Image (cartoon, helix red, strand yellow):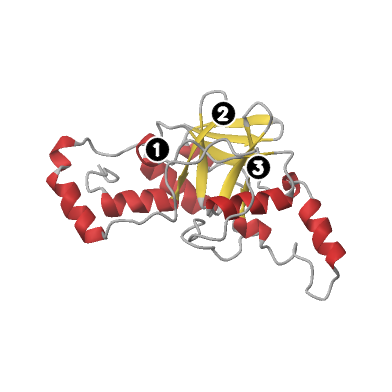
Amino acid sequence: MFFVYGTSGQVFHGSMEQLRQIHGVGSLARARRTAAVGRDGRDEAEQPGSAFAAVSGMGAKDAASPRPAPVAAYTQAQQGAHQRRPLTTVADVMSHPAITLLESASVQEGWQLLAQKSIGQAPVVNLTGQLVGLLTRAELLSPERLPHPEQNAMAWQALLRQPITALMWTPVPSVGPEADLRRVAQVLLDTGLPGLPVVDAQGQVTGFVSRSDILRAVVTDPPLDVWG
């Protein structure tokens, strides 16, 4: 099941086929998308920024942590493949708990969170934890939003003081943890987004599934059943 959430709450729930019929969703990111940053939105380790209270979790997968070599990982996974079930759903590969931003956060706080956690995007939630949008590094780097180099410091300060609601994607597609990975991959291709927030029945953000999560599973986990 797929969902679309905005600042007014849930505006859609249904199948992938129904989601693709919604005006604007198919070209959601293509209209304003900039070049990808890092590994499909997941950056390499950066200098850490300051922590702040909008983080709802540390995340189960650290982008800066060492990864096993693909061949060695494949061999190791093959040896134990008979003991593991195939990976078919979002819940099998998603990162959780989610790293989120409160909708009251500033652009500066958004920058700090993405840098501190070495991530390229973060779901934006309201005070009850319900999804309202998605902040991406690509949007923060959008040339039409950045002040010109010759502008004074006041212009940059004004940008950093803006609320993240002025820059985030909203409404934004999301997905339930039981969704089929192939359908999620199709939605990511349709929208150009780096990943989708994972939500429960009440719209609470419980995780995030990215293109990197799916590709990592393909490389390191042979029982992944994306074509069955």
In this rendering, the label closer to the viewer, 2 or 3 = 3
Closer to the camera, 32 or 166?
Answer: 166
Q: Residue at x 59, y 32 (%)?
A: 12
Badge 3 local density, few (<14 within 10 Å), some, or many (20+)? few
Report if the CB atoms under discs 3 and 1 are less than 8 Å apart: no
**Secondary-structure class at tag 1:** helix
Badge 1 local density, few (<14 within 10 Å), some, or many (20+)? many
What residue is pinned by disc 1? 90
Closer to the camera, 62 or 144?
Answer: 62
**Secondary-structure class at tag 2:** loop
Decide: is 203 above or below 84.
above
**Secondary-structure class at tag 3:** loop
What residue is pinned by disc 3? 52
What residue is pinned by disc 2? 204
Quarter holding the C terminus? Answer: top left
Decide: is 59 above or below 114.
above
In this rendering, the label closer to the viewer, 2 or 1 = 2
